Image (cartoon, rainbow, N blue to C red):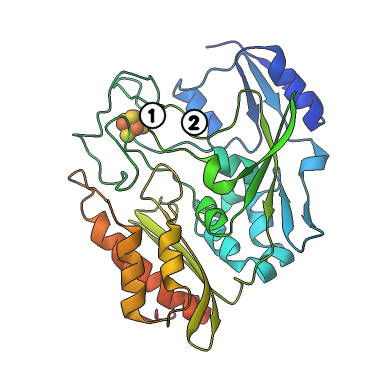
C-alpha cells in the first residue's frame, strides 16, 4: 500500500500550481487508464490532483473562426453525440464511438484520451523489462509476442502502438491541443503532441512536467460530407485496433480537392503522411489512386514477425476506408462496404 495525498482543485490555475509544488503528482479526470497504471505500479504519485470539478474545462463551444473547442473534461460520449460534432466533425464522432465500451466512453474525458498509455502487454507486466516503463531495461516485444505492435516509426527501443481511436480522427482533422502550466499557456499542433519512441521511449507526448491539457481546438473545414473511420480488430467491441483508418475528402464531381488520412494501431502516434494526401488532391477518386496513396503511407513499414500481416492489412484498409468515405451511408450498421 502506497500512501498518497488527495487534492481536489476547482480551477486550472490552482491545479497547475498544485502540480508545480511537489515532485510526484498526477492529475485524475475520468481515471479509466491511470487506475490501471497505478494498480500495476507503473505510476505512483505522491499527490493525486482531482480535476473533475473544474467547470471551465467542461464545455464544447464554437470558435469565432468557425471551428469548435472541446474542453478537456468533456466526456468522450458527450463529444461524440454533441450536435456541433455530429454536424461539423462526424469523422470524430465515428472514431470515438469505435473506441472502448459505452461505459468507458461515459467516464473518459477528451483530454485524458490523448494521455492514455499503450496497452502493450509487457508494459503492464512488472516482472519483465520494458524501455517505456524502465528506460534502458530492454524491449521483450522485439522477439516476443508482437501481433499488436508497430509497423511504422518504431525502433529497437520500443515498438508499442498508441491505442486511441479518437486521436486518429483528431490527427486527420488538424486539431490543436491547448495546454497550461505555471509558466502560462501554449498551443501544440496535433502532429507534434505525440512522439515516436526515438531515444526516449518512456515519453509518449510533448507535455512538459506540470502541464495540463485545457482544451482541444478543431479548425473549420469541409470534411463533413465524405468521411469514414474504419477500425479492424479481433472482435467487434471493446478491442483495440489492429489497424484503423480515418479518411476524409472534399470532392468536386469525382475529383478530390482536399484529403486527410490518418492511421491508428500502426505506430507510437497517429500516423499521417501528407505526401499521400498531396498525391490525391486533384486526382480522380479511383481504386488505382487510393492504392498509390496507401503505398505512399506505408513506405518504410517493417514487420517484427507476428505483426507482419499488418502491412498488407493496412494497405487494404486505406483503400477500403477511402472508398467508404465516398459514401458515408455505407457505414450504417449492416450496410455493405463500397469495396
Ligand atoms: Fe515496453 Fe515498448 Fe517494448 Fe512494449 S514495445 S515492451 S512498451 S519498450
The image shows residue 238, relative to residue 286, as above or below, that is above
**Which residue matches tag 2?**
36
Res. 243 in view: yes
Q: Residue furthest bottom?
A: 253
Identify the mark at residue 35; answer none if there is no mark. none
- Ligand 1 resides in the quarter of the picture at top left
The image shows residue 5, relative to residue 68, as above or below, that is above
**Which residue matches tag 1?**
124
Q: Quadrant of the C terminus?
A: bottom left
Mark 1 secondary-structure assignment? loop
Name the side, left or right, on which 283 lies relative to 97. Answer: left
Mark 2 secondary-structure assignment? helix
Residue 84 placement (x, y as % from top left): 73, 65
Is the Cβ of the residue at disc 2 closer than 8 Å to that at disc 1? yes
Name the side, left or right, on which 97 lies relative to 133. Answer: right
Residue 173 placement (x, y as % from top left): 58, 59
Res. 109 in view: no
Q: Nearer the viewer, residue 163 or 185?
A: 185
Name the side, left or right, on which 312 lies relative to 223. Answer: left
Q: Residue at x 35, y 24 (%)?
A: 131
Between the C-alphas of marks 2 and 1, the distance is 9 Å
Q: Residue at x 30, y 64 (%)?
A: 295
Judge the density around disc 1: few (<14), some (14-19), many (≥20) Cα neighbours within 10 Å.
Answer: some
Q: Residue at x 55, y 33 (%)?
A: 206
Residue 136 placement (x, y as % from top left): 32, 18
Name the side, left or right, on which 275 lies relative to 70. Answer: left
In the picture, residue 51 is in which quadrant?
top right
Q: Nearer the viewer, residue 46 or 224?
A: 224
Of mark 2 and mark 1, the one earlier in the sequence is: 2
Q: Residue at x 59, y 56 (%)?
A: 174
Amino acid at each position: 500500500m502506497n500512501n498518497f495525498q488527495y487534492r481536489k482543485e476547482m480551477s486550472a490555475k490552482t491545479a497547475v500550481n498544485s502540480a508545480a509544488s511537489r515532485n510526484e503528482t498526477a492529475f485524475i479526470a475520468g481515471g479509466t487508464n491511470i487506475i490501471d497504471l497505478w494498480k500495476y505500479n507503473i505510476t505512483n504519485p505522491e499527490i493525486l490532483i482531482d480535476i473533475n470539478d473544474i467547470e471551465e474545462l467542461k464545455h464544447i463551444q464554437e470558435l469565432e473562426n468557425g471551428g469548435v473547442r472541446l474542453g478537456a473534461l468533456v466526456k468522450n460520449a458527450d463529444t461524440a453525440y454533441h450536435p456541433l460534432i455530429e454536424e461539423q466533425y462526424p469523422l470524430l464522432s465515428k472514431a470515438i464511438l469505435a473506441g472502448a465500451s459505452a461505459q468507458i466512453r461515459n467516464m473518459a474525458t477528451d483530454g485524458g484520451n490523448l494521455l492514455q498509455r499503450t496497452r502493450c502487454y509487457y508494459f503492464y507486466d512488472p516482472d519483465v523489462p520494458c524501455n517505456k516503463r524502465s528506460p534502458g531495461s530492454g524491449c521483450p516485444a522485439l522477439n516476443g509476442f508482437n501481433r499488436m505492435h508497430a509497423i511504422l516509426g518504431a525502433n529497437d527501443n520500443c515498438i508499442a502502438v498508441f491505442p486511441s481511436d479518437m486521436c486518429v480522427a483528431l490527427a486527420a482533422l488538424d486539431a490543436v491541443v491547448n495546454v497550461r502550466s505555471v509558466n502560462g499557456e501554449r498551443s501544440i499542433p496535433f502532429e507534434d503532441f505525440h512522439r515516436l519512441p526515438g531515444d526516449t521511449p518512456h515519453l509518449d507526448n510533448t507535455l512538459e512536467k506540470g502541464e495540463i491539457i485545457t482544451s482541444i481546438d478543431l479548425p473549420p473545414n469541409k470534411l463533413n460530407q465524405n468521411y469514414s473511420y474504419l477500425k479492424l480488430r479481433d472482435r467487434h467491441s471493446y478491442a483495440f485496433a489492429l489497424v484503423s483508418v480515418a479518411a476524409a475528402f472534399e470532392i468536386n464531381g469525382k475529383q478530390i480537392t482536399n484529403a486527410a488520412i490518418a492511421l491508428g494501431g500502426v505506430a507510437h502516434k497517429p500516423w499521417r503522411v501528407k505526401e499521400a494526401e498531396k498525391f490525391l488532391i486533384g486526382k480522380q477518386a479511383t481504386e488505382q489512386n487510393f492504392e498509390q496513396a496507401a503505398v505512399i503511407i506505408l513506405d518504410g513499414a517493417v514487420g517484427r514477425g507476428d505483426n507482419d500481416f499488418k502491412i498488407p492489412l493496412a494497405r487494404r484498409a486505406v483503400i477500403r476506408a477511402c472508398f467508404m468515405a465516398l459514401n458515408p451511408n455505407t457505414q450504417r450498421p449492416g450496410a455493405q462496404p463500397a469495396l
